[in-house]
Amino acid sequence: MSSDFPRLLSPLELKSVTLRNRVVMGSMHTNLEDRDWHIDRLAAFFAERARGGVGLIVTGGYSPSREGWLWPFACAMLTEADAERHRVITTAVHEAGAKIALQIIHGGRDSNIPNNVAASAVTSPLVAFEPKALSEQGIESTIADHVRCAELAKSAGYDGIELMGGEGFLINQFLAPHTNIRTDGWGGSAANRRRFPVEIVKRTRAALGENFLIMFRMSLADFIEDGQTFEEIIALAKELEAAGVDIINTDIGWHESRVPTIVTSVPRAAFVGYTAKLKAHVTIPVCASNRINMPEVAEEILERGDADLISLARPLLADPEWVNKAAASRVDEINTCIACNQACLDHTFTRQTVSCLVNPRACHETLLQLLPTRHAKRVAVVGAGPAGLSAAIGMAERGHHVELFEAADKIGGQFDLARRIPGKEEFSESIRYFRRKLELTGVTVHLNAHTTAEQLAAGDWDEVVLATGVRPRVPDIPGIDHPMVLSYQELIREERPVGRRVAVVGAGGIGFDVSEFLTVAGNTAMKLEEWQAEWGVTEDEQARGQLTTPKPSPAIREVTLLQRKTGPFGTSLGKTTGWIHRATLDAKGVEQIGGVNYERIDDRGLHISFGPNREGLRVIDVDNVIVCAGQESVRDLKDQLETLGVRVHLIGGADEAGELDAKRAIEQGTRLAAEI
């Protein structure tokens, strides 16, 4: 055991269940749960994390009834046949030394099915169907469904269950006045609203005995109007403990909340204060969650006594060996979750198989393997951005002899730009990880290396990989070479000064990042108190939903964001993060103008017009114009090398520019490494 993290790695006794450490793999829906033929892949996914050292794994959520499906034919645990299929999962996890619990989730009004039911007939903004309010008989049947699901989980070999009582799903809907407007014994007073989850726990404990683990995923901050007060949350926790809950796990926010909870701009461990306050009122273990991605942060939480366990979900997508690396004092080798959501939550909500931007093997363990090569090759990789780095490291891990050539004086490519954007500081962790992996795998790195086709051809390489990335596209606007014009790269690298009034040309992902960059002072991570004020978050125990009036800091510049397209801004942004960027620009007062023609740039500023007839001529009086008009692939070497008879592999931005897509780049690099 590492002396660096003695609390994190210490065991925990829970009745008949002993956890080997304090790390819980939190529930994630991977979209492998929904189809029986994916269960072997799901077992491999869990087993790899169990071998990586996790103490307790919680599965993605399984419905206890067809009424609780999150969408038609979503995963459920309804029959003995379902339970029997799950034995491949529980066996694999137990053989690797970990414990595993099945999460039970009933979607309630968030079930996107026509026969959905809820505490009250209050429609969710997330689905197309109005729910039917459960009758008292329906409530009794739903409680029985939960108990039956728990019994099936036990017969499947699970060590326990986790009841999903947060994120605005059915149990949470009973608890919050926002969604429970009943006037019978299951609504009205806070005590009545608590009856539903407490009855589920009591009856599950009675049915399954004392030696079966019951966890409760509990909303400690609803972040919705007319949510629970913290006093009500404390009262619920006490009743749950008395009813037989063994662990309270932290849940923060509903899917419809106006407060971001798990994106990279949220400060690390931002919600541990709620966990610490709750822990003071119960004697059972409490688990901290959300934006805890490195062992030192987890250890500090445990050392302060703010929690007894640490829940990691996406960090274990990023690195299944997270616990083992912490235990072996190899923290610098951890592939850190950067909370980008691009391959995890964005995939979940578009029904794609979940993976991870920085680890494309996640949920593809049986399909994407970096096995030792039988024939070591000499490989040249040109470009040390995300694509080139992932390819070089993957090939070196397999046993190839790899040399990496980078024209800049440092590795990172577009990640080196991203880390400078406010709220994206976590990208520095990825660069640190890549740098360490280059050392460990023995890749020879050449910086400031402007490699020519002739030099590569003369190198007698078995394979040449071009990961030369992109360059900013220069639009055909009269005056584009005016001194007031900067590329987004020049701005982000702070190569030239920028005035108070700025126009941003192009409203894709880079345009939004640049606009945020321009409106804040410096590029250091926001302190927790500043972030709470920005989004209207409070720890006042009387505040419903833990919300208060947002007080965003004023923008330091006047920014105008423009796009040629008509219609809403930010439609190409991530499904689960786009709304945050749009809300941020609104809070900073960024003017957004669509449907424009760029007429010219001169000393007066940026001249624009509107529509095909170029009407409504207007001059935007600015000090600077920042160009974010897309990118072009840098692939000059490709044709030259092919002319010289060299076989070339194109990956990343060199293959396809588009929006800067690190997810695609890293996956391409990893898949190429697996194939060569």
Image (cartoon, rainbow, N blue to C red):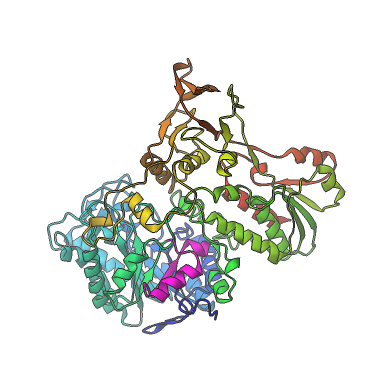
Going by the image, does 14 lie left or right of 414? left
Identify which residue, 667 or 428, lies in the foreground: 428
Task: Give x and y (percent) for residue 469.
Answer: 66, 44
Tell me, yes or no, if residue 616 can be seen here: yes
Tell me, yes or no, if residue 360 can be seen here: no
Task: Give x and y (percent) for residue 126.
Answer: 34, 47
Residue 663 highlighted magenta (yes or no) = no
Quarter of the picture containing the C terminus is: bottom right
Q: Which residues are magenta?
A: 291-317
Quarter of the picture containing the N terminus is: bottom right
Going by the image, does 97 lie left or right of 545? right
Please tell me which residue is depicted at 82% across the width and 47% down the height of the picture: 456
Residue 296 highlighted magenta (yes or no) = yes
Residue 243 position by quadrant: bottom left
Question: Is residue 649 depicted above or below 228 in this figure?
Answer: above
Residue 12 position by quadrant: bottom left
Task: Give x and y (percent) for residue 652.
Answer: 64, 46
Question: Is residue 670 depicted above or below 517 in this figure?
Answer: below
Task: Give x and y (percent) for residue 625.
Answer: 53, 31
Going by the image, does 105 lie left or right of 447? left
Please tell me which residue is depicted at 47% across the width and 58% down the height of the picture: 30
Identify which residue, 237 or 146, lies in the foreground: 237
Question: Total marks drawn?
Answer: 0
